[in-house]
Image (cartoon, grey):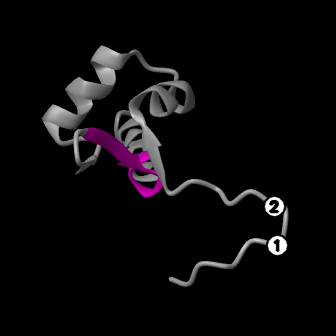
Amino acid sequence: MTLATPERGAAAAPLLLKVPEAMRVLSLSRTVIYELIRAGRLRAVNEGRARLIPVSAINEYVALLEREAGESK
């Protein structure tokens, strides 16, 4: 995977989200986000004391939900 260099003045899309940002993206509560992390359904990394969720983990979680929804039909 190669990362494109953003053009001058363009904001790069974040690769890691803080828990409140992940809450907004997924429309889930803080408690649910931490439960998903503890259950291993949502990956997270630690940088110092900060818990960060990779954007790729958000995409994987959504794909997991879609697969589960397809299996239940």
Q: Position of residue 68 (x, y in %)?
A: 35, 39
- Tell me the crowding category of disc 1: few under 14, some 14 to 19, or many 20 or more residues within 10 angstroms, Cα based: few
Task: Give the residue pinned by disc 1.
Answer: 7
Relative height, residue 51 to residue 35 (above, below): below
Judging from the image, what secondary structure is the residue with disc 1 in? loop
Judging from the image, what secondary structure is the residue with disc 2 in? loop
Tell whether 20 sits left or right of 34: right
- Tell me the crowding category of disc 2: few under 14, some 14 to 19, or many 20 or more residues within 10 angstroms, Cα based: few
Amino acid marked by disc 1: Glu
Q: Are marks 1 and 2 in contact (CB under 8 Å)?
A: yes
Residue drawn at point x = 44 percent, y = 20 percent: 28
Relative height, residue 59 to residue 28 (above, below): below
Q: Quadrant of the C terminus?
A: top left
Task: Give the residue pinned by disc 2.
Answer: 10
Is residue 55 shown in magenta?
yes
Amino acid marked by disc 2: Ala
Which segment is the magenta one?
Answer: 50-58
